[in-house]
Amino acid sequence: MRLVRWTPDDLFRRLDDVVAVYGEAMNYRTDLLAARRGYIATHVRRPGFRAVASLTSEGHLAGFGYGYLGSPGQWWHDQVHRALDGDARQHWLTDCFEVVELHVRPPAQGLGLGSRQLTALLTMAPGSTALLSTPEADEQRSRAWRLYRRFGFVDLLRHFHFPGDERPFGILGRGLPLTPQAPADRTASAPGPSVP
Ligand SMILES: CC(C)(COP(=O)(O)OP(=O)(O)OC[C@H]1O[C@@H](n2cnc3c(N)ncnc32)[C@H](O)[C@@H]1OP(=O)(O)O)[C@@H](O)C(=O)NCCC(=O)NCCS
């Protein structure tokens, strides 16, 4: 398995695969995926865009992650901005890299790919904070929650509802840069996290 850095064009060229991995990982209905495809296509052009992909030796996509710098006028940023109080807004949203998607195909989950992808993404990320949202779940049993906690993400908002989505989400954040000394970054010494 190779971990590679993707340019915006790299991701755009593999958009069908990206949406397929996203759908499998999140177990989303096909009709939701068409809309998501359109969003991702616009996300690749946002400032500060960074992306990584896990590729098999045959070049199949096993996982990916991407994010960009948040700014007013972006839907996710505006929802979180509205929900945070003034000090928290100032601290977390002023210079913020949003981890927008991080997914691994189910057969490849639990093998460390998500950790490697997140390490690479946060190492490349511009900004002084990193934010993300993830569906509420049992923190001990959920791979996503375990991963984010290990990387030092803390709660900004819990049981948050985005308009049009009935699921509650946690909004989590951590400071940047990601230092190799961070106790969360267990993958820093693991083989293969460097991204060409
Ligand atoms: C979340 C996700 C990206 C993590 O990637 P991954 O490659 O599966 O994760 P890793 O192998 O790096 O392991 C992450 C954590 O899950 C734990 N884990 C592994 N197998 C597990 C299992 N069967 N049950 C619960 N936790 C498990 C790992 O031990 C690790 O936790 P730790 O750091 O406390 O040891 C991936 O599982 C995924 O795509 N999940 C579905 C989609 C999703 O939730 N995306 C994030 C939404 S924001």
Image: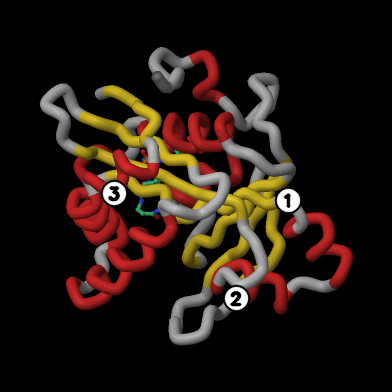
Query: Mark 1 highlights which residue?
Result: 95
Q: What x and y, as percent, mark residue 77?
A: 62, 67
Say which amino acid is labelled 1: Asp
Find residue 12 and name its label: 3
Residue at 34 percent of width and 26 percent of height: 3
Instruction: Evaluate if marks 1 and 3 touch, with contact meaning CB atoms under 8 Å apart.
Output: no
Between 68 and 180, the one lying in front of the other is 68
Mark identifier at residue 160: 2
On screen, residue 64 above or below 187 = below
- Mark 2 and mark 1 lie on one chain; the one further toward the N terminus is 1
At x 71%, y 78%, the residue is 82
Pointer 2 local density, CA inside 10 Å: few below 14, some 14–19, many at least 20:
many
- Asked if ligand 1 lies within 8 A of label 2, the reply is no
Residue at horizontal 66 percent and vertical 68 percent from the top: 72
Marks 2 and 3: CB-CB under 8 Å?
Answer: no
Quarter of the image holding residue 104? top left
Does the residue tagged 3 have its C-beta within 8 Å of any atom of ligand 1?
no
- Residue 130: x, y in percent? 64, 48
The amino acid sitting under disc 3 is Phe
Q: CA distance from mark 2 to mark 1?
A: 22 Å
Quarter of the displayed picture in which ligand 1 can be seen:
top left
Element under disc 1: loop
In the image, taking residue 132 as reference, residue 12 lies left or right, namely: left
Label 1 crowd (10 A; few <14 / some 14-19 / many >=20): some
What coloring was used for the rendering?
secondary structure
Which of pointers 2 and 1 indicates the residue nearer the eye?
1
Residue sitting nearer the eye, 71 or 118:
71
Type of amino acid under label 2: Phe
Alpha carbons under labels 2 and 3: distance apart: 30 Å
